[in-house]
């Protein structure tokens, strides 16, 4: 296995990760919202335990805004998109496309100020969509306070990445085991999605990022692999902790339509514990730090190709929160 280092301790379901030029790492922290790891190793939790609608929040994707505050995708049954700053956590937008706030999987804010969110499935519970046949996830945009669905009919929508340079919006469809993409420009998305990459057996793509060459990195749960797809479609495993017997067990359940939460909430892996997201770090953006579902720390590995500076790269976040 590729040389792997680890950062952090005591993290709670650090599913999503962000990095900045200051060397700070921010990750989702279950029940609270966001945790911060400073370059010297000091850690802060940025909000107390929080409930929305009487339900503890389950932060999934997180986004850093230009003013140093955060958006948090609340994947608990209470759903909605949350705002987090030094004053605490509150509802930012209900993200209602139907009659109730859905569990929100992911959020990112792009260089144009558009807020992109994903909803994995309209089913309750979402585990009803853990199959090869359901495609009721969608991508939505919040722009000037207006919420609208822009791509639907997706197979368990997870992370999305706007790439204005390349002219694509990349979409992780976890239960289709693929990355799709749709044409994108400053006016929005156009046309219908096309398949960019089909992932290997057992690789359920969760988080994605675009590198400086236009390749896409995919963090895959179940197989616990980080895979790079080059612009021509070639694939390479950057790091992985694949357990073949576990992959076989999950794929059998997937084929039978009996895949459930235990297949995501447990894993026999010992090094990479269901890696679920990634962010580039370092002055040269030549390292990758990965979020995950099951560990209390974050794996770090050398990047095969340097990353791009995200829109929030130069944002300076004031110090607040409780050390832990």
Image: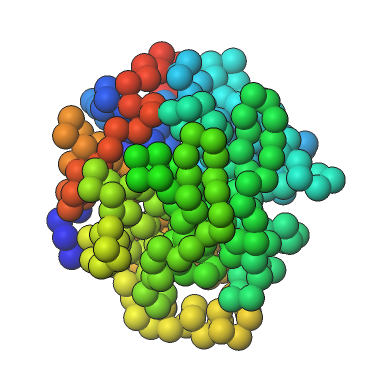
Can the viewer see residue 299?
no
Q: Is residue 280 above or below residue 293?
A: above
Residue drawn at x 35%, y 33% as measured from the top left: 310
Tell me how the rendering is colored: rainbow
Residue drawn at x 70%, y 30% as measured from the top left: 146
- Looking at the rendered structure, the number of numbered marks drawn on it comes to 0
Q: Nearer the viewer, residue 123 or 211?
A: 211
Quadrant showing the C terminus? top left
User: Where does residue 188 sit, x and y in percent of width and height?
Assistant: 55, 40
Q: Quadrant of residue 239?
A: bottom left
Q: Is residue 141 above or below residue 213?
A: above
Q: Quadrant of residue 93?
A: top right
Residue drawn at x 28%, y 53% as measured from the top left: 215
Q: Nearer the viewer, residue 185 or 310?
A: 185
Q: Quadrant of residue 314?
A: top left
Residue drawn at x 56%, y 54% as measured from the top left: 191
User: Where does residue 24 sit, x and y in percent of width and height?
Assistant: 31, 27
User: Where does residue 254 sit, x and y in percent of width and height?
Assistant: 55, 79
In the displayed structure image, the side of residue 134 where residue 176 appears, left or right: left
In the displayed structure image, the side of residue 131 where residue 282 appears, left or right: left
Q: Nearer the viewer, residue 71 or 150?
A: 150
Q: Is residue 77 above or below residue 47?
A: below
- In the rendered image, the residue lying farthest to the right is 99
User: Where does residue 82 sit, x and y in percent of width and height?
Assistant: 63, 31
Quadrant showing the N terminus? bottom left
In the displayed structure image, the side of residue 143 where residue 234 appears, left or right: left
């Amino acid at each position: 296995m590729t040389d792997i280092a680890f950062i952090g301790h005591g993290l709670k379901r650090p599913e999503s990760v962000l990095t900045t030029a200051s060397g700070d790492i921010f990750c989702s922290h279950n029940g609270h919202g966001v945790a911060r790891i400073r370059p010297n190793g000091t850690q802060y939790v940025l909000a107390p335990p929080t409930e929305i609608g009487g339900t503890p929040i389950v932060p999934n994707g997180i986004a850093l805004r230009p003013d140093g505050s955060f958006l948090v995708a609340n994947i608990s049954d209470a759903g909605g998109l949350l705002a987090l700053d030094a004053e605490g956590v509150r509802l930012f937008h209900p993200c209602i496309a139907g009659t109730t706030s859905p569990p929100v999987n992911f959020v990112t804010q792009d260089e144009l100020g558009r807020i992109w969110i994903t909803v994995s499935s309209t089913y309750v519970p979402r585990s009803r969509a853990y199959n090869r046949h359901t495609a009721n996830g969608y991508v939505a945009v919040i722009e000037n306070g207006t919420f609208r669905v822009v791509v639907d009919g997706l197979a368990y929508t997870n992370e999305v990445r706007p790439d204005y340079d390349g002219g694509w919006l990349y979409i992780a469809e976890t239960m289709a085991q693929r990355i799709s993409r749709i044409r994108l420009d400053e006016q929005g998305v156009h046309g219908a999605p096309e398949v960019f990459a089909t992932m290997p057996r057992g690789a359920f793509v969760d988080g994605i990022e675009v590198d400086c060459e236009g390749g896409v990195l995919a963090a895959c749960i179940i197989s616990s692999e980080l895979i790079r797809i080059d612009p021509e479609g070639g694939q390479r495993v950057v790091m992985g902790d694949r357990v073949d017997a576990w992959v076989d067990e999950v794929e059998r359940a997937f084929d039978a339509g009996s895949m459930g939460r235990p297949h995501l909430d447990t894993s026999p892996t010992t090094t990479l514990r269901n890696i679920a997201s990634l962010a580039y770090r370092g002055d040269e953006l030549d390292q990758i730090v990965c979020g995950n579902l099951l560990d209390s720390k974050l794996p770090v590995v050398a990047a095969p190709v340097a990353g791009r500076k995200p829109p929030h790269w130069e944002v300076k976040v004031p110090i607040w929160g409780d050390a832990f």
